[in-house]
Each structure stands twice: as structure tokens, then as C-alpha cells.
């Protein structure tokens, strides 16, 4: 029997495809005539007709969003973690969407530039080795690589393998204090819970192999200590962007990915992907996701 939920999901999927393919130029129609049509026109204002279409698509998805996401993260918490350069307005909107879905943001963790800078690998490696010995022996593999290890340590501090989450303990506080004390992360105040889900938001794309390897290590490590991780980026991050490149890494088998969070539709899809991650790992969703614009069912 087809329920209202299935209708809503289908409609949202359609508008997500519209938002990605028509509004933002992603999807299977984006390359048609693009080279000729856009050459030399980067600074021209968007045509009124296209602007109206954009506004209409966003307004419809905005109206459908609350009914679609409501209750999907009820009694669940999400650790919101950002990479340097993440769009502040988008991050705020994602937090609001988690709340609209009935969930809570356990805390926001802003990773620092040095943590993802390949030239600072020695610092990250030394700190990770010390924390492994002092706080995480038996919890993190002794032979883990530098960024797998620091990702797993961060996972121990902010995340939980229990779907209901767990209280912050002394080990978690010690790891957060050490990582933030080294200038690798901004430490939030008054955190009470470690969350089952981690939403890792992409920032500035350095476009080099070293940064891609760091991202893969962090995501893999976080996934090892949580119920589920969603790596989220803008539409530009998909396809040939950093999110698109991440999807070719073996770490993507354990981490869900979604591009399009710069749209209302993409933020709705983020909630559905977080919900799916409570039971199923991996999956590539969004404007250029191989598994579709959003999880259905």
C-alpha cells in the first residue's frame, strides 16, 4: 500500500533532482550545451526565469521538508564536526534541520587548519601516539595510520557505538582537552553526551592527494567509533570535488556521503541519510550520488 510517507519521499526526491540538475547545474543534464552556453558569462546575472524556477523549487522543498523529516531522528543525537572553511550559514542550517527532525546536536566540533594540513603530520602523529598510550590502549588499533588513529581518537571523544548515545567520560574529556590544547580543534563547552551519529561537514577543498588521504583517514577513524558517519558537502564538492574523490576511497564503504547541503533539498536529504546510517553504513547520495538523490524507504 502506498502511504503518505512514500508520496512525500518521492516528491522530495523529484525536487532534489530538480534542485541539483536544473538549479545548480549538477546531474545528467548539466553538461548539455554547457561549454558553449556558459563561456564568458560567469559574471552575468541569473536570468529572471531561472531565478523564479530556483525560488519555486526551494520553496516547495521547504514546505515539504518538515513533514518529511519530522521525527526521523527522535531521541537521537548528532555530533556536528566541521572541517576548516565550512560555510557557517550551511552548518547552522544543518543543525536546525537536525532539531526539526526531532534530534539534538550533542556538540559542534570545529577542526583546525593544522589537523588537516599535510605539513603538520608530525604534530598529529606525535599527539596521536601519546593519546593512544595514555587514553586509548585497546580502543584504537596500535598499528593505525596517523589520520586513522586521530580520527578514531576523536571518535572515542565525541561518538558512541550505542544508538542511544553515552555520557561523556573522563577519557573523552582528556582527548578533547589534548587535541584542542594542541590547537587542532576548538573545544565546545558543557558537552554531556557522546552521539551515535557524526555529521562531518566539508570545508575548503585543498585539491591535493595529501588532503584527500587525511579526510579518508579521519572519516574511517570516526566510523570505527560510532554507529554511523555522514560526510556532507556542497554540490560543488560532488563529482570531481573532494566528496567525489572520497567516494573512490575504500573508506567510503563505511561512511555515507552526500553532496548538495547548500540547498534546502540537500539538507532534507542529509537527515534521511543520517537516519539510514543508524542501521546501514555507506552509500553515496545527493546531487551526484551514485545511490540516488536521497535514501528512500
Image (cartoon, rainbow, N blue to C red):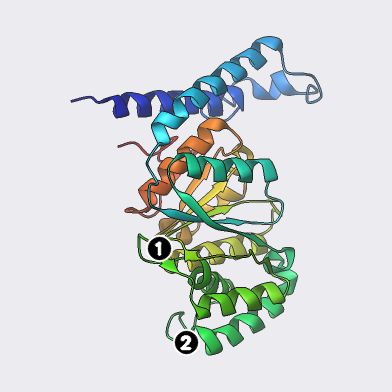
Q: Which residue is mark 2?
A: 137
* Tag of residue 165: 1
Q: Residue 118's image quarter?
A: bottom right
Instruction: Check disc 2 and report its element: helix, strand or loop.
Output: loop
**Residue at image location 54% in from the left, 26% down from the top:** 19
**Where is residue 96 shown, x and y percent of the image?**
55, 41
| Res 290 seen here | no
The one of 5 and 103 positioned closer to us in this rendering? 103
Cα–Cα gap, marks 2 and 1: 22 Å
Q: Position of residue 241 (x, y in %)?
A: 62, 46
Q: Is residue 280 above or below residue 180?
A: above
Could you say where residue 163 lies in the image, as x and y percent from the top left? Answer: 35, 60
**Element type where label 1 sits in the image:** loop
The answer to whether residue 265 is seen in the rendering is yes
Residue, x 69% and y 25% (percent of image)?
Answer: 35
Tell me which residue sits at (45%, 31%) in the image: 66
Crowdedness near tag 2: few (<14), some (14–19) or many (≥20) residues, C-alpha within 10 Å: few
Closer to viewer: mark 2 or mark 1: 1
Q: Nearer the viewer, residue 18 or 156?
A: 156
Q: Residue furthest left?
A: 1
Residue 183: give x, y in percent of width and height. Answer: 73, 71
Quadrant where the C terminus is found in the figure: top left
Residue 141 image-quadrant placement: bottom left
Asked if residue 198 lies left or right of residue 52, the reply is: left
Give the crowd class for mark 1: few <14, some 14-19, many >=20 residues within 10 Å. many
Residue situated in front as seen by the camera: 240 or 20: 20
Q: Is residue 107 above or below residue 271?
A: below
The answer to which of marks 2 and 1 sits earlier in the sequence is: 2
Amino acid at each position: 500500500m502506498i502511504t503518505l510517507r512514500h508520496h512525500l519521499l518521492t516528491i522530495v526526491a523529484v525536487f532534489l533532482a530538480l534542485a541539483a540538475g536544473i538549479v545548480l547545474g549538477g546531474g545528467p543534464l548539466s553538461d548539455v550545451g554547457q561549454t558553449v552556453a556558459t563561456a564568458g558569462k560567469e559574471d552575468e546575472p541569473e536570468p529572471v526565469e531561472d531565478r523564479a524556477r530556483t525560488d519555486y523549487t526551494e520553496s516547495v522543498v521547504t514546505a515539504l521538508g518538515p513533514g518529511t523529516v519530522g521525527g526521523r531522528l527522535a531521541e537521537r543525537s548528532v555530533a556536528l564536526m566541521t572541517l576548516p572553511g565550512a560555510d557557517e550559514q550551511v552548518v547552522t542550517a544543518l543543525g536546525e534541520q537536525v532539531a526539526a527532525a526531532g534530534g539534538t546536536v550533542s556538540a559542534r566540533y570545529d577542526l583546525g587548519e593544522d589537523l588537516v594540513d599535510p605539513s603538520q603530520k608530525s604534530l598529529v602523529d606525535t599527539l596521536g601516539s601519546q593519546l593512544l598510550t595514555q587514553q586509548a590502549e585497546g580502543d584504537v588499533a596500535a598499528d593505525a595510520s596517523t589520520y586513522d588513529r586521530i580520527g578514531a581518537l576523536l571518535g572515542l571523544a565525541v561518538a558512541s557505538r550505542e544508538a542511544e548515545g553515552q555520557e561523556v567520560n573522563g577519557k573523552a574529556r582528556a582527548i578533547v582537552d589534548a587535541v584542542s590544547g594542541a590547537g587542532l580543534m576548538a573545544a565546545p563547552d558543557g558537552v554531556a553526551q557522546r552521539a551515535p551519529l557524526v555529521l562531518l561537514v566539508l570545508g575548503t577543498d585543498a585539491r591535493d592527494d595529501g588532503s584527500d588521504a587525511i579526510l579518508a583517514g579521519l572519516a574511517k577513524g570516526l566510523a570505527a567509533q560510532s554507529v554511523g558517519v555522514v560526510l556532507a558537502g556542497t554540490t560543488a564538492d560532488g563529482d570531481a570535488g573532494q566528496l567525489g574523490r572520497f567516494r573512490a576511497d575504500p573508506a567510503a564503504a563505511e561512511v555515507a556521503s552526500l553532496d548538495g547541503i547548500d540547498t534546502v533539498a540537500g539538507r532534507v536529504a542529509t537527515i534521511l541519510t543520517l537516519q539510514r546510517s543508524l542501521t546501514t553504513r555507506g552509500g553515496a547520495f545527493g546531487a551526484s550520488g551514485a545511490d540516488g538523490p536521497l535514501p528512500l524507504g
